[in-house]
Structure formats: structure tokens, C-alpha cells
Image (tube, rainbow, N blue to C red):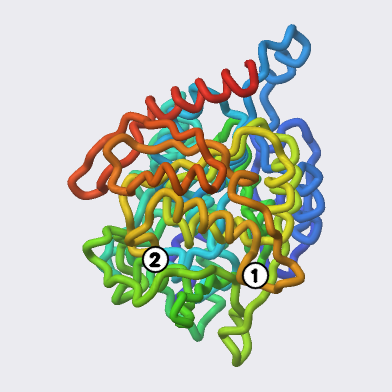
């Protein structure tokens, strides 16, 4: 594949050009507009962007006006542990209650389009983060909708058709660019071109564009250019115009690849999030988590942990450090939420890190479990108290190093459970009471023949609002 396939050359940075490359790369009339003479080298990117612990969008004159006027009653602040799929369905409705939400997401996904990026270019998985950023993105203007449509687009499954469509997009010829103004177009296209350049440099690897996410490609290009996951999130947040008080936080801030493993109660070790949750015949297949389409696990999951991605021993356990911004948010938010979703591969990977359990157990705020409405491969046969026990064990790191384990009871981590009405997971009230959990709230649900039972978004957010009004007196 030659560079000429991409049409006219774009001005994107080379890996050995490190001076004033942001200004040389693209005009930023909207990006960091409060720094009119802003310049940044890629070696400075991490330092500059990390001066803001969380990835926020500051450049609106309206925010300055608000600061100088009488402040309204502050919105409640939440921190949500979730994956990139299940909680997305309520993000839009949650904005009606508050936008002061820290979304904490794992970076160990190894399925679909993300798997191909990690295989060829390395680095952490960005699919869940990209998915949440898009859900939080602005929809108030036609251009915002056009940008959201572009970054949310997936290429065809057929590999050759996917490659041809990718070329149309990166060359700026595709109809998806309609409605995207020149500043946004040049910003997005430059990082897509940089992503393509990085692929071409890996001449020994053949990249498959099948079912590829344009948002993932943009995200990966920005991360590699800045050599910073934080900086890439900041840029993506600005381009997609996420509310400035909404935070998207990787639970581990890293530029390295992370691999999730799990140990079953029968001693079996499974490597890779995809293999644990929803194994497929090929990594470019669309992910389908339907319980009926995947084989059951030979034994229940005992724990999840991180394992080495390099070297000869690929089952060697490693202990990455938690993102400090997550710990800072945990110390101050009004409410902590364990969202519905894949329990062991979306929620627990964020909970097993040292520091998470320590802070959550010390807080006296509402700590809410949003119970799944349907069991999946990971939780077959589970009751509500089994979910509580799994979260408690993860936060206590019960099966890890005995010198680093905690001994906290479940009630120090969870004090409220929201249950979807007519859900398929048994609510064993007596066992929950034995765990010290007495507040169980039934929430209206939606039944779907394919997705099963899940929370009605409006009812869920209303129930959350009622809880916060009662507990926080807001």
C-alpha cells in the first residue's frame, strides 16, 4: 500500500519533528482558544494536558459569564464505574439530572476494531472510552450531529469494501464530511491521516479495516501522536464538545497495552477480555454478548486480574497503578455508582486496583449498585447477593496478595441496590440483609426479545434523583 492511495498529502507530524507541531499541524480557532499563541511539542503533551486532572472542555465565554453571576444550586456529582455499552443507554437521560459525572472506564477491551488497533499499533484499548465520549457529545447543532455521526461511523464488514471506504474518508471525499466545517474537518482528518501513516510504517503488519470505528482510528492517532492517553481524551472531548463538567477517565492512565485475565474456581486461567466475556471465531466479528450465542464457562469466575502482554510468560500477573484522577474524584463525589454491564470484564477491572477499595470504604455517601436485568456468560446462575459478593471481593482484592487484601464487609461498598422490575436475576433479600444491605429499590424496566430486561432510563434517573434528594438534602 503506497502513500499515494491517500490522495493529496496532509500536513501531519513526523515522529522526529517535535517543535510547535500543534500549530503546524492544524488551525485551532476553537481548540484551546484561550491560548491564542499556543504551541506544544509531543514531548510536552502529557505535562501540559495533565495540568488539568480531568479531561474537561474549557473555552466557552458563557462559562465565564456564569462564574460572575449568582451561582444556581450546584448539581450533584457522581462517579460511575461502567463499561462501554450497557450504561450508554442512560447517559443521555442522566444529563437531565446532572452533568457533573466522572465516567470511569476500563482500558483492557480486546475485541472488534479495538483488537486490530492494539495488535498492529499497541497501546491501551480505547473503544469503551470512545463510546462514552460519543454518548456525551454535543447534539445541539447540525455540525455537532455531523461530527458525532462521523466519529461514530463503522466501516463495512467486508474487508475490501472497508478499505475503500476508509480511503474516501481519510481523503476527505466521503459524504460523512458533509456539514463538518473546515476547522473541524482539518483537525479530525489530520489525526486520521496520522493514524494511517502509523499503519504504513508497520510494513510487516497488514491492518484489517473490517468493521473499523472511525472514532477509534481518530483516538488512536491522537494517542500515538501525543504519546498520552490523557491528551487524546482531552482532544476527543474538545472535538466532540463534551460538557466541561463531565469527565471521561481511564481507570489506568497508560500508553501501554493491558491484558485482562481471569481465574475460575476450578483453577482455569482465561486470557483476554473477549475470551472471558464473549469469545468469537475471529477478532473482527461484531461483538454479540447474547447469553444464548456463547458457550457457558466451565466454572464460575473467582477473580479478574491483569497479566503481562509482553515476554515469554503471558500468564504473569502484573499490577498497574490506578489513575490518580480517579482517586481524587472518589474522595469528593456525592454518589458512587456501580453500573449495570458485564460484571467481571467491565466493572471489576476498575475495582481490583490498589486504592479504589480503600477510598470507597471510607466514604459515607450513597453507593449504588445498578443490578443487571439479565444474566450473561459471566454471571450465569447469579443472584443479587452474588453480584454484591463479587464486587466486594474485587474491592477487597480477596484472592490476591494476602498482604494487600482488605477485610471490609459488603455494606461498606454498597448501601443501595436498584433492581429492574421483572428482571431475571433473583433478589435474595435475606442474603442481602446478611450482607448489611437493606435498601433495595425496584425501577421500571423495558423488555426486549434480544437484549432481555433493562432499566427504563427515565425511571432509573428519577429513582436516582429521589435517592440523592433524600440522602443529600439537595
Question: Where's residue 101, x and y in %?
Answer: 60, 34
> Mark 1 highlights which residue?
256
User: Between residues 57 and 249, which one lies in front from this camera angle?
Assistant: 249
Q: Earlier in the sequence, mark 1 or mark 2?
A: 1
User: Between residues 91 and 19, which one lies in front from this camera angle?
Assistant: 91
Mark 1: give few (<14), some (14-19) or many (20+) Cα within 10 Å: some
Residue at far left of view:
449
User: Between residues 149 and 332, which one lies in front from this camera angle?
Assistant: 332
User: How far separated are the C-alphas under marks 1 and 2?
Assistant: 22 Å
| Residue pictured at 54% horizontal, 79% vertical | 202
Q: Secondary structure under badge 1? A: loop
Residue at far top of view:
70
Q: Is residue 319 visible?
A: yes
Q: Is residue 276 above or below residue 214?
A: below
Question: Where's residue 414, x and y in %?
Answer: 57, 43
Mark 2: give few (<14), some (14-19) or many (20+) Cα within 10 Å: many
427 displayed left or right of 129: left
> Mark 2 highlights which residue?
277
Q: Is residue 279 above or below residue 59?
A: below
| Residue pictured at 53% horizontal, 25% vertical | 467
Residue at far bottom of view:
312
Quadrant assignment for the N terminus: bottom left
| Residue pictured at 33% horizontal, 45% vertical | 373
Amino acid at each position: 500500500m503506497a502513500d499515494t492511495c491517500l490522495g493529496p498529502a496532509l500536513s501531519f507530524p513526523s515522529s522526529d519533528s517535535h517543535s510547535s507541531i500543534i500549530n503546524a499541524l492544524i488551525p485551532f480557532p476553537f481548540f484551546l482558544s484561550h491560548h491564542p499563541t499556543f504551541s506544544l511539542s509531543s514531548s510536552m503533551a502529557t505535562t501540559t494536558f495533565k495540568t488539568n486532572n480531568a479531561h474537561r472542555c474549557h473555552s466557552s465565554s458563557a462559562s465565564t459569564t456564569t462564574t460572575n453571576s449568582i451561582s444556581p444550586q450546584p448539581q450533584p456529582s457522581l462517579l460511575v464505574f461502567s463499561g462501554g455499552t450497557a450504561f450508554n443507554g442512560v447517559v443521555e437521560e442522566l444529563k437531565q439530572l446532572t452533568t457533573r459525572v466522572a465516567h470511569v472506564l476500563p482500558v483492557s477491551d480486546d475485541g472488534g476494531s479495538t483488537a486490530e488497533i492494539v495488535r498492529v499499533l499497541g497501546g491501551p484499548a480505547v473503544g469503551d472510552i470512545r463510546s462514552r465520549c460519543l454518548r456525551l457529545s454535543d447534539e445541539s447543532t447540525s455540525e455537532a450531529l455531523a461530527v458525532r455521526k462521523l466519529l461514530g461511523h463503522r466501516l463495512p464488514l467486508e474487508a475490501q469494501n472497508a478499505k475503500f471506504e476508509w480511503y474516501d474518508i481519510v481523503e476527505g471525499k466521503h459524504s460523512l464530511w458533509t456539514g463538518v466545517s473546515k476547522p473541524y474537518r482539518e483537525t479530525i482528518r489530520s489525526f486520521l491521516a496520522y493514524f494511517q501513516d502509523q499503519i504504513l510504517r508497520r510494513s510487516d503488519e497488514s491492518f484489517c479495516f473490517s468493521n473499523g470505528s472511525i472514532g477509534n482510528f481518530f483516538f488512536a492517532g491522537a494517542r500515538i501522536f501525543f504519546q498520552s492517553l490523557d491528551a487524546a481524551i482531552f482532544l476527543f472531548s474538545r472535538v466532540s464538545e463534551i460538557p466541561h463538567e463531565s469527565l471521561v477517565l481511564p481507570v489506568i492512565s497508560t500508553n501501554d497495552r493491558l491484558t485482562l485475565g481471569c481465574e475460575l474456581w476450578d483453577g482455569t486461567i482465561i486470557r483476554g477480555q473477549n475470551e472471558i466475556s464473549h469469545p468469537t471465531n475471529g477478532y473482527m466479528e461484531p461483538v454479540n454478548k447474547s447469553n444464548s450465542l456463547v458457550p457457558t464457562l466451565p466454572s464460575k469466575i473467582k477473580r479478574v486480574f491483569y497479566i503481562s502482554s509482553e515476554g515469554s510468560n503471558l500468564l504473569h500477573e502484573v499490577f498497574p497503578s490506578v489513575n490518580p484522577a480517579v482517586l481524587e474524584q472518589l474522595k469528593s463525589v456525592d454518589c458512587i455508582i456501580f453500573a449495570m454491564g458485564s460484571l467481571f470484564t467491565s466493572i471489576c477491572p476498575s475495582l481490583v486496583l490498589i486504592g479504589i477499595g480503600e477510598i470507597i470504604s471510607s466514604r459515607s455517601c450513597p453507593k449504588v449498585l445498578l443490578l443487571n436485568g439479565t444474566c450473561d456468560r459471566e454471571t450465569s446462575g447469579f443472584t443479587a447477593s452474588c453480584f454484591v459478593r463479587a464486587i466486594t471481593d474485587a474491592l477487597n482484592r480477596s484472592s490476591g496478595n494476602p498482604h494487600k487484601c482488605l477485610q471490609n464487609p459488603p455494606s461498606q461498598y454498597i448501601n443501595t441496590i436498584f433492581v429492574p422490575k421483572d428482571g431475571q436475576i433473583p433478589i435474595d433479600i435475606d442474603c442481602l440483609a446478611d450482607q448489611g444491605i437493606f435498601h433495595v429499590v425496584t425501577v421500571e424496566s423495558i423488555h426486549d426479545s434480544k437484549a432481555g430486561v433493562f432499566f427504563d432510563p427515565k425511571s432509573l434517573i428519577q429513582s436516582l434523583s429521589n435517592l440523592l434528594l433524600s440522602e443529600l438534602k439537595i
